Image: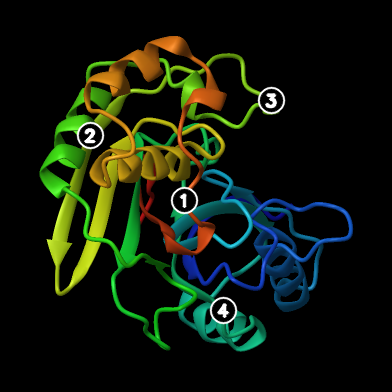
Amino acid sequence: MIEMKRYFLELSYKGSPFHGWQIQQNAFTVQECLEKALSTYLRTPISIMGSGRTDTGVHASMQVCHFDFAGALSLEKFMKGINAILPKEIAIHSIREVQPEAHARFDAIDRSYFYRIIFQKSPFLDELAWLIFQQPDVDKMNEAAQILLQHEDFECFSKIQTEVNHFRCKIHSARWEQKDGELLFHITANRFLRGMVRAIVGTLMEIGLGARTLASFEELILSKDRTKAGKAAPAKGLFLCQVNYPANLYLD
């Protein structure tokens, strides 16, 4: 009997044409597209589990998923073959054999996102950034971002209808960076709630533009009330960019 093996795939995708990561009825998703490609290439039904969901229009410069396969697999040949099948918006960057019980979602140590804001119209970044025309106070936004590290309950930044047991997240870092005429927000945490990063970005932008005071930001977090937070920033500026795992999960 051929032994079943588990693999981690590292991939990236442009989220613009997809209705998010997770398979759903009557919608074109990254997971569905990837499962079809894997099933075609490996000639057997394949299901995958991602490190987490991304919403409609959100991108990933690094996403990780796992799948099981019983059979010989030439990793170099696989990389060329699967990328030839996938659409141009999805690219597989690596495949690694892992421990049989390794889990792309539950074994992740932390995840990182970045959010891109631009201040001038760009035909190249239109689907990859939020265009605004006012220059915000980045120092105030960074002060507010540091307040996030002092709390763990972020119900105020979560989508209301979401299937979670709790709203606790441990944010390890959160900062704004001005680089090459762009404004980037970087955030790393052990887990994220649905819509959390976009709600944080939208609220911090209100502080930067003077529509919300710095003092009210902590009050908002303590309120646990999503209706009091800012409008979510557009999906197109958000990227999942890093997922970290314990080194002992990998067999290669």
Q: If you read the primary sequence from the N terminus, does the residue marked by circle 4 or circle 2 appear first?
A: 4
Mark 4, residue position: 89
Q: Distance between the Cα atoms at labels 3 and 2?
A: 26 Å
In the image, which is nearer the foreground, mark 4 or mark 1?
1
x, y (%) of residue 211?
Answer: 33, 38
Q: Distance between the Cα atoms at labels 3 and 1?
A: 22 Å
Q: Is residue 17 above or below residue 27?
A: below
Q: Is residue 131 above or below residue 246?
A: below
| Disc number for residue 163 | 3
Q: Is residue 124 left or right of residue 182?
A: right
- The reply to whether the C-beta atoms of the residues labelled 2 and 1 are less than 8 Å apart is no
Q: If you read the primary sequence from the N terminus, does the residue marked by circle 4 or circle 1 appear first?
A: 4
Q: If you read the primary sequence from the N terminus, does the residue marked by circle 2 or circle 1 appear first?
A: 2
User: Of residues 7 and 156, which is closer to you in this image?
Assistant: 156
| Colour theme | rainbow
Q: Amino acid under label 4?
A: Glu
Q: Distance between the Cα atoms at labels 4 and 2?
A: 32 Å
Image quadrant of residue 134? bottom left
Q: Distance between the Cα atoms at labels 4 and 1?
A: 22 Å
In the image, which is nearer the foreground, mark 4 or mark 2?
2
Q: Amino acid under label 1?
A: Ala
Image quadrant of residue 110? top left
x, y (%) of residue 197?
Answer: 42, 41
Q: Secondary structure at mark 4?
A: loop
| Disc number for residue 145 | 2
Q: Is residue 66 above or below residue 129?
A: above
Q: Residues within 10 Å of mark 1 (few under 14, many from 20)?
A: many
In the image, which is nearer the foreground, mark 3 or mark 1?
1
| Disc number for residue 233 | 1
